Amino acid sequence: MRNIRRQLDSKNDREKLDGLKRLIAMITKGRDVSEFFPDVVKNVVSQNIEVRKLVYIYLLRYAEQEPDLALLSINSFQKDLSDKNQIIRAMALRVMSGIRVPVISPIVLLGIKKCVTDSSPYVRKTAAHAIPKCYSLDETQKDSLIEIIATLLKDRSTITIGSTVMAFNEVCPNRFDLIHPCFRKLCGVLPDCDEWGQMAILGLLLRYGRSQFLNPNPKVVASKATTVTSKSFYSSDSSDMEDTIAHDVVELDPDHELMLKSCLPLLQTRNSGVVLAVARIFYHLAPAVQADKIAKPLIRILRNFRELQYVVLSNIATMTLKRPYLFEPFLQQFFVQSTEPVFIRDLKLTILANVATDVNIHSLLNELQQYVKSSNKDFVAASIQAIARCATSVPSSADRCLKLLMKLLRSSNEIVVAESVVMVTKLLKDQPGENKKSILALAKLLETIKVPSARANILWLIGQQAELLPEISPDVLRLAVKGFADENNYTKLQILNLSSKLVILNPDHPTLNLLHQYTLNLARYDLNYDVRDRARFLRSLTLPVDNQPGIAQLKQHARDILLNNKAPPVIENDMERKPMIEKGHVLDAHPLFFLSLRNVSCL
Amino acid sequence: MINSLFVINRHGKIIVEKHWRGIISRQIVDVFNDESAKFMKLPPGTLERSDISSNQEAFFTKEDVPPVLESNKYWLLNVLRDDLTWLCPVEKEVDPMLVFEFIHRIIDVVTDYLGDVSEASIRENFVTVYQLLEEMMDYGYPLTTEPNALKEIIMPPTIINKVMTTVNAAAGVTPKFPQNMSNIPWRKAGVKYTQNEIYFDIVEEIDATVEANGNVVSCEAHGTVVANSRLSGMPDLSLSFINPRLIDDESFHPCVRIRKWESDRLLSFVPPDGHFKLMSYRVALSPYQAMPLQIKPQILPTKNGGKFDITVHPRSTDGKPIEAIVLSIPMSKSTTSVNATCNVGNYMYDPITKTVKWEISKLQQRERAPMLSGTFSSSDAQPDMGLTVDVDFKISMYSVSGIKVDSLRLFHEGYKPYKGVRSMTKAGKFHVRT
């Protein structure tokens, strides 16, 4: 350590460099080397540019902890701001604004003002970068900073504009009045900016467009309200779709059209962030006929690092909720490999179920059937859910899906069987009459299957359909009660339900009544609160008790309470279940990223 | 915007930390490690799977940790690449694409500087890495990310450069400082070569999924044109293809003038210096033209084991031999032993990963179809089936899509450069189901 101090004090630049490098290496590792602050700051005036650069790195890291000493360096930066070399000027402003000591904010502001009028675009770019830094140091400077942003927005250089828009987005994201005069210029410079600038500008254009232009697809959005029907709305047949689109054609504002036109070429950029940003603009702001241009590029950027793939897939999943037809032609792109990470696989399965239509359901089910053979049981379970989801989203395929799932009941793997049971019971609630055989098959399974959720589901289903199965349901109950003590709590609750339902259906059957009484007694001494509680409730509902007025009234409706026809379930996908901000939601990967759309008046 | 970046090794320890907007405590990494342990179904506090868990039903790895995790205060955006995790805790809303694209760009640039990105190479070059991080991002916003521009500011740690700085510093010579930046961000000014040359590599990867009976489920080619430019001055190039119509969808390096491509199907650009990826494209392939290989696997399970045989039929590839064929055949997790014979190449069974690797170094058409057949035994009465065979191969001087370069013309400079074009076709994600 002493050695480093000696090196920093040395007159020899090589020694200094060496000492500084050792310090930087320690910073990188996360060691605290702030004790050298005074020794390092001295070197800020060094003639050697390499030394100075390393000093800057050190300074930026520790200035916050040593504000007083850091101020010592300010003078040299102010001097550098008038240097002949543009790079030195830019560097001085960059480092000075990066010193996180609130006292210096007026000096930084002065520096920014000076650099905004600099002849070099690089220096002006640095000035734009310094704006958010200055804003975070001292929020009261906001007004003068906005003024600077307004000046910079008039800048003609493609080098600065991206950074200016980043500053705009951070300091005053909703001052669209500043954007109005330069909107056309922003569209014009878009292709010549660097990729990060493009992303910032596209983000701004999206917000601007959604708040300033008319909705290009009034009709489509109206149908968003009824999500479930909108799926069939598009997929039913294409001529129908064209009709609605033809109705939809809205005269676009010339500026609106200009924006779409200038964004379009960016779909060919190598940066997938830019491509996705353009896709978002087209999804929200382009007439439905044009929106299909985004599908291909999105598919292209899917072949990418897993993280990027994840974001793109989340966006596609959201898009397919409302406009599945966009990605229908690319069904195969969402086929899954069993080796893919869980989160990619789940998203792909969601998308597959979303884009299922009468036309492609055949090949889709063939594919899903393959997945079910996989040795990765977790993957199989997810695929089974996807099959069930297809059955609900494409009603005409329900039969085939059901058959597929019934086949899986014979699988040797318990997880597979359990998952299929759960899904089959969900599907069977729909049209029990036609599927008596399937219910019988499920009842038989009770002898072998052990997974509680599956057992509970089967028992529930049999109770629900008891009327149709007078021959077997009492027998199922008899067998179930036999093993009551060893069952899981969920199953116990369903045994209680089943037995009550049967008694309500056959109030005068002596054996059933005895069996019911026996079940209730078993439950009465159960260890679990819920089971005991349910038993008490069902006892007063089903068995004759002393006349308490309220209960008598309740009893009259016992049948309705227990055997009500429940609405057919919708097997949802994860996307729909996620908390979404009703209107602002739409296109961002994660709830976290909705914020920016929150304060925009929505389509 | 990006607040901080932590580079974490496989044991969950921090190698590099860098803060752009005030300091985030290192404890965030512990939070991250615990969160990822949840997704790997491990008890918190451990990151590496010991062998006891091999009997677990589902097998989760680091790969399965989602790239966006939630903690109390931050969103933990993480990138896993080459065994290192790059973690960005984010406080405020930010476009996740920006963060992920940027981290991958950092990794690309560091790879370019150091040759490879690993714990060892980073530790050896802390200062360079830290300078790069400093230069590439300013207060959480990307600043300079073009390798050409960066190399003007930060010297790559090559031996010659190291010697030069030491000598200069010792002699008291201040290093030269670039006076002006070039007008084109991706190309530095004043490049000079005694011999002007430019090379293009067209590399195409076939992504395909094939069923056991030979039916092709999906199949397409992804091509990239990688260039190595060693040209003096500010050359303006225009490259044309014989058959650009084949291209289905494409993307370009920022140097390419997109409008020119749209009007004339011509790549017009001022190239960066050195290696760069000029263009990527996608070509839809017809299943029959596309498959250089037809692979037919057959696995017949019996009680406590089974039989398998796999044949490889080469298809027409313009007479070019198919090289470095590797078939990875995963066996069920309960496999205890494998016994096989092959008439071409050699095979190896890895008892830890439970995969059979069969390598054929070179395959010409009209040779006898290679075949691997054998038996395996398993501790499970009914071994798992439904695995996919992973295929790898490459064919030099062949492009499966048929894309060919027509001409390259050079403007704005007086010299005649040496031009070279090579093509190559490789297997991308090539899977055969069993």
Image (cartoon, rainbow, N blue to C red):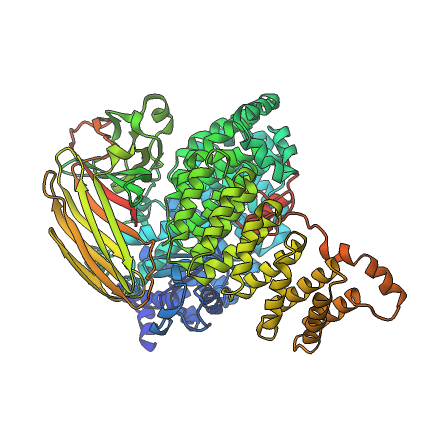
The answer to whether residue B116 is seen in the rendering is: no
Q: Picture coordinates of residue B162 (x, y %)?
A: 22, 58
Q: Quadrant of residue A556?
A: bottom right
- Residue at image location 50% in from the left, 68% down from the top: A65
For residue A107, above or below residue B379: above
Q: Compared with residue A404, is residue A119 higher up or lower down, i.e. above or below?
A: above
Q: Quadrant of residue B210?
A: top left
Residue at x-position 22% and y-position 40%: B425
Q: In this picture, is A113 found above or below B405?
A: below
The picture quadrant where one finds residue A14 is: bottom left
Q: Can see residue B328?
A: yes
Looking at the image, which is closer to me, A414 or A71? A414
Quarter holding the N terminus of chain A? bottom left
Vertical order, A442 against B417 (above or below) = below
Looking at the image, which is closer to me, A397 or A215? A397
Residue farthest along the left direction in this orientation: B367
Q: Nearer the viewer, residue B229 or B250?
A: B250
Image coordinates of residue B192 in percent, x first then y, are 20, 39
Residue B72 falls left or right of residue B317? right
Task: Give the residue displayed 46% in from the left and 69% down from the top.
Answer: B30
The C terminus of chain A, quarter of image: top right
